[in-house]
Amino acid sequence: MSDNGPTPVVIVHGGVSAPASHQDGCEEAAAAGLAVLAGGGAAIDAVVEATRHLEDDDRFNAGHGSRLRLDGSTIQMDAAVMDSDGGFGAVAAVSDVPNPIIVARRLVDAPPMILAGEGASRFAARHGLTGDVRVTDAARSKFRHMAALASRGKLGREYSAWRRFDLAANWNYETPFPDFAAVAREEDPNPDDCDTVGAVALDARGGFAASSSTGGTALMLLGRVGDSPLPGCGLYAGPAGAVTATGEGEEIISRLLSKWVYDRMASGITAQAACDDAITLFPADIVIGVLGVTRTGHGCAANRAMPWAMAGARPA
Ligand code: ASP
């Protein structure tokens, strides 16, 4: 930290188990966030800009590039932003919004903190923020691969809850329960990757912010909301720092993971040690990644590969 205050920094991740080839997208997003801080902007607007960048890069599972849900055609996204002044905004299960993080940012200045589904879409429309969300070949390929695993009884151990679950009896999509075997194709080399995106930032005034945006996980009923839009779960920011998480949302929610990491950082444990400790809370077959920043350093840990990038000087 200089005499004039902290040196601004933005750190982003591109999702746990996302391929290393996505690294350049993270670097560009971090640089875009840092440009906001360099222009005197606040941490909250820096993480929003970095996240918007990743939502527009359709290699990531957020905005354009979001996963398809189990009917093979629906997209539902979650996104949130939080800052150390107590600002919070989130959208959940929105479909026709290319940049959910921008809608979440609008909600920071509105009385409701979280809007879901149709209400979120109508709010977005009032702000001119609705539009088509691209369905990528990668999203179709991941869906066909998941259909293959599901129809052949080959879901991995990380899906143990789903293996015990009667999906047909609980099917809540408009279309009838699909014949997964008919669309199945084991063509995706990395079907389990999460690829949710997130960012944390520290601005020149000492303010922190965290963000998160996702198309969700591989197996989801209609209307499923993950950790990403929930404060303390997928993200958290306070006077001691900011945290964002990626991985199996239900596992993250049940541990209030981002608040857990934040509390450790606030108690004086380094950001890196707090992130490392967080990973040990999960069995090895649950994919998890976490990113944190404090005034004195940053931390990044994951139990699979996770592209991430930092722009700005490392907090001293
Ligand atoms: N946490 C996200 C979710 O469960 C998925 C991810 O991190 O990729 O929706």
Image (cartoon, helix red, strand yellow):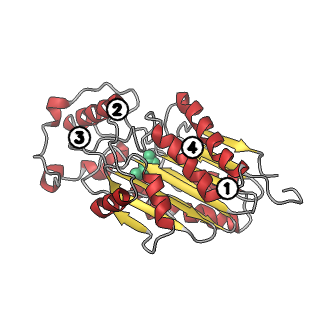
Answer left or right for 182 relative to 58.
left
Residue 32 at x, y percent in the picture: 62, 42
Compute the Cα span from label 1 to label 2: 33 Å
Answer left or right for 283 relative to 273.
left
> Which amino acid is tagged 4?
His
Give the label on residue 41, or none.
1
> Which amino acid is tagged 1?
Gly
Q: Residue furthest left?
A: 176
104 or 161, nearer to the observer: 104
> Which amino acid is tagged 2?
Thr
Give the quarter of the image for residue 134.
top left
Give the label on residue 73, or none.
3
Question: What residue lies at 34% left-to-right and 46% top-to-bottom?
Answer: 131
Report if the beta carbon of the residue with label 1 is closer than 8 angstroms to ligand 1.
no
Q: Can residue 280 be seen in this view?
A: no
Question: What residue lies at 49% left-to-right and 36% top-to-bottom?
Answer: 18
Task: List the residue tagged with mark 2.
Answer: 136
Task: Answer with mark 1 or mark 4, whichever residue precedes in sequence.
Answer: 4
